[in-house]
Image (cartoon, rainbow, N blue to C red):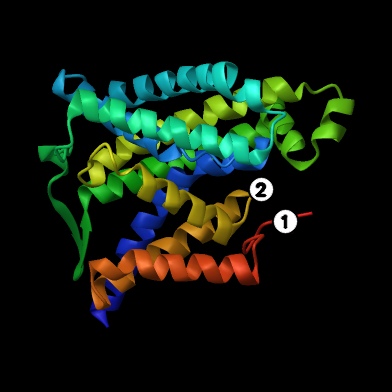
Amino acid sequence: MEIVFQLLIDALLLAGYYALLSSGFSLMWGVSGIINLAYGSFVLVGAYLVYTFHLLGISLFLAFPLTVALGLLSGVVLQHLLINRLMNYEPFTLLVLTFGFDILLSNLLNFFFKADVRSLTLESLSGSLFVSHFIVPYNKLLVFLLSFFAILALQLYLKGTWTGKAIRAVSFDRVGAELCGINPGKIYAISTSLATALAMLSGGFYALLQGFTPFDSGGITLKAFFVCVVGGLGNVHGLLLGSLVLALSEVFSGFYLGEGWKVVISLVILVLFLLWRPQGVAGVKYA
């Protein structure tokens, strides 16, 4: 029974991170209707940025804010140079655009950093916290806490500021929001910028949890897509539920069936939700 509780602890810690990992993907999809296939590459850009800052001797307390700032700037550039030009095209065109951008970013990362597995190992986070018979690694605990506060800050921003309320209004009803004086174009730019910053911040945390290469983007994007489909778009509760389902499926299937089954079980759950409840557990039914 102890091993089950240990696995539950591992899943809970992982779910906290997955909630942050998928938050930017969910935000961009929910507001502008774009499924960003380049999302995983932006996560990896954040991982490599934090890794590079660490090599340069920059403290993580400064590295993470710098990564967020560069993410905000990258989102603005992405929106104005690429997405705005194709917003009125068919959704498939935007899928092709983001897929091509994903390939471009992956190969650029490979050009500058090569395909070697990189990892951010800090001596201060190499140990574990022992609670009774259970083990909580310091790096997973830190990432969980930072992810929790980042999600909380996002929630407060969306519910407590005018811009956040405008983002929510556009996501619910773009025409109605426009009639109320909200400029959807500006909101799309803000949401894309914020989504990219969240992706790159989660990339910095990704570097603390495991090794990474330039070609991990597909798996990362799939995780974010899983959380959004299972949890549903439009609220943080769905994000947390989807993240918990993904974490539980990965941790338990990886332990009892083997690491090779993690993706298989996740894909089976994803397909079942797409067939049975495509709006997700806590999402709104699609029109």
The residue at the point 43 percent across, 19 percent down is 69
Mark 1–mark 2 contact, CB under 8 Å? yes
Q: Identify whether 127 is placed above or below 45.
A: below
Indicate the quadrant containing the C terminus: top left, top right, bottom left or bottom right.
Answer: bottom right
Residue at label 2? 234
Which residue type does callout 2 highlight?
Gly
Q: Position of residue 53 (x, y in %)?
A: 22, 21
- For marks 1 and 2, give the CA distance: 7 Å
Q: Identify whether 262 is placed above or below 67.
A: below
Which residue type does callout 1 highlight?
Val
- Judged from this view, the residue extending furthest toward the bottom is 1
Q: Earlier in the sequence, mark 1 or mark 2?
A: 2
Give the secondary structure at mark 1: loop
Q: Quadrant of residue 199?
A: top left
Position of 165 compared to 25: left or right? right
Residue 210 seen in the figure:
yes
Q: Identify whether 130 is placed above or below 42.
A: below
Give the number of the disc on residue 284. 1
The residue at the point 58 percent across, 49 percent down is 236
User: What is the number of callouts on the image?
Assistant: 2
Position of 266 compared to 98: left or right? left
Q: Nearer the viewer, residue 264 or 1?
A: 264
Give the secondary structure at mark 2: loop
Q: Position of residue 246 (x, y in %)?
A: 43, 62
